[in-house]
Image: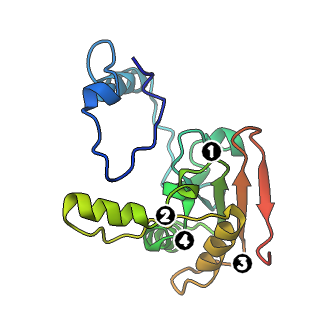
Amino acid sequence: MNDYRESMPIPASQPLPPSSDSTPAAPDGTVTDRLVEANRHYAAAFTDPGMDARPVLKVAVVACMDARLDLHAALGLELGDCHTIRNAGGVVTDDIIRSLTISQRALGTRSVVLIHHTGCGLLSLTEDFRHELAAEVGQRPTWAVEAFKDLDQDVRQSMQRVRTSPFLLHTDDVRGFVFDVTTGLLREIDPRG
């Protein structure tokens, strides 16, 4: 039986296997049951930290959803330090701009850190993924895949999208990085190329 943490890319044209085959159940139920049980243990020792939703460091971090990125540990962050906004690829989409706008205008953040990473799944996808998905389900997705071939250039594009958004108040402290999943190090990307 495969470890539930292993991942295998599945083309859009190939249906997902039944959940019992793709993700083994926790000893007493599903993976979700295991997470709910872990939450019960967490809540038993939980005390209200007395914070509000405003990040202490006034920073929003936009990063890929990849499970190998432990952003708090990698950046030395504690609970309450930042807003963490994640999606596939860490690309700046309209929804990322939406979240950053709320983060800045309603919750006081001033800095934006963008993080892509080596070995990203979006490096191997194309818009064909979207077309295959549409053919399979009979409906076109309303979103773009936002795949890319060049990590550095996509970080630059993401920085540019943040810096030119008319909705954001603070665009002077926007920095972009590539996280190396084998070394844990960040490499800063020069916005000028």
Q: Quadrant of the C terminus?
A: bottom right
Asked if residue 115 is positioned above or below residue 1 in the image, the reply reads: below
Dot 3 surroundings within 10 Å: few (below 14), some, or many (20 or more)?
few
Q: Which residue is mark 1?
A: 71
Image disc number at residue 44: none
Element type at mark 3: loop
Image coordinates for residue 103, horizontal then vertical, percent: 51, 66
Image disc number at residue 104: 4
Of the two numbered discs 4 and 2 in the rendering, the one whose residue sits closer to the viewer: 2
- Point out the tag, 4 or 3, that comes first from the N-terminus: 4
Which residue appears at 71% of the width and 46% of the height? 75
Which residue appears at 30% of the width and 67% of the height? 141
Q: Which residue is mark 2?
A: 126
Q: Marks 1 and 4: CB-CB under 8 Å?
A: no
- Point out the tag, 3 or 2, that comes first from the N-terminus: 2
Asked if residue 132 is positioned above or below residue 159 in the image, the reply reads: above
- Point out the tag, 3 or 1, that comes first from the N-terminus: 1
Which residue appears at 34% of the width and 66% of the height? 131
Asked if residue 106 is positioned above or below residue 167 in the image, the reply reads: above
